[in-house]
Image: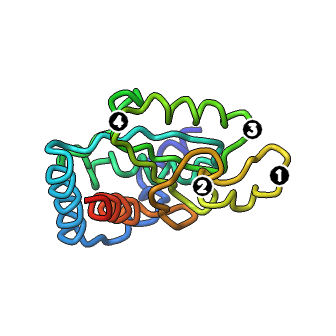
Amino acid sequence: MQKLLLESLIKAPFTEPAPQADTVALAELATRVDRAARARLGRSLSIRQVDAGSCNGCELEIHALGNAFYDLERFGLRFVASPRHADVLLVTGPVTRNMREALQRTYDATPGPKWVVAAGACARDGGLFADSYACVGGVGAVIPVDIHIPGCPPTPTALLGGLLALLTKSA
């Protein structure tokens, strides 16, 4: 046991180095999203994320938007806990039969004007789970979708690009 502890103190951690990212391009993209939200809404963009039955791959990428690297709140974008405070519903995963009513209720509780973003391949058409007995299909089968963000899962940069496309599309 002492040998293992000593080795763990001496050896470097067994992890891969983080990929190099273009922080300037990321900052510019996030700034463009912030400007588009303020031009469209007059304030920052509030996002309510709904997991309609995903494998959680998309959630990991969405959570990355809040980490120290992306730190979306510095650009005025924020995730809210209630659909009553949201401008955008960011929905992931195929819609399962158990989540159909919850998704519809969340959509109904969101005040207008509201937008729905389907994030990931499963949210588009059900993805791998499309033929499952437990799945009713993509998000569009339950509520109207304004924009799809492709990917399995979509990267944080793709999510930002999708939000920017949504804001500029509807302006």
Mark 4 secondary-structure assignment = loop
Q: Which residue is mark 3?
A: 97
Q: Residue at x 17, y 70 (%)?
A: 24
Residue type at mark 4: give it: Ala
Alpha carbon distance from label 3 to label 1: 10 Å
Residue type at mark 2: give it: Ala
Q: Which residue is mark 2?
A: 123
Check the image and report above or below for 14 versus 87. Answer: below
Image location (x, y in percent) of residue 6: 47, 46
User: Which of the two residues, 16 or 147, is positioned nearer the viewer here?
Assistant: 147
Q: Residue at x 38, y 62 (%)?
A: 162
- Tell which circle, 4 or 3, labels the residue nearer the N-terminal end: 4
Q: Residue at x 65, y 51 (%)?
A: 141
- Tell which circle, 1 or 2, labels the residue nearer the N-terminal end: 2
Q: Which residue is mark 4?
A: 86
User: Which of the two residues, 54 or 118, is positioned nearer the viewer here?
Assistant: 118
Mark 2 secondary-structure assignment = helix
Image location (x, y in percent) of residue 62: 43, 50
- Tell which circle, 2 or 3, labels the residue nearer the N-terminal end: 3
Residue type at mark 1: give it: Ser
Which part of the image, by quadrant, shows the N terminus?
top right
Alpha carbon distance from label 4 to label 3: 24 Å
Alpha carbon distance from label 4 to label 1: 31 Å
Residue type at mark 3: give it: Arg
Q: Residues within 10 Å of mark 2 (few under 14, many from 20)?
A: many
Circles 2 and 3 in contact, beta carbons < 8 Å: no
Q: Which residue is mark 1?
A: 132
Image location (x, y in percent) of residue 166: 35, 59
Which part of the image, by quadrant, shows the C terminus?
bottom left
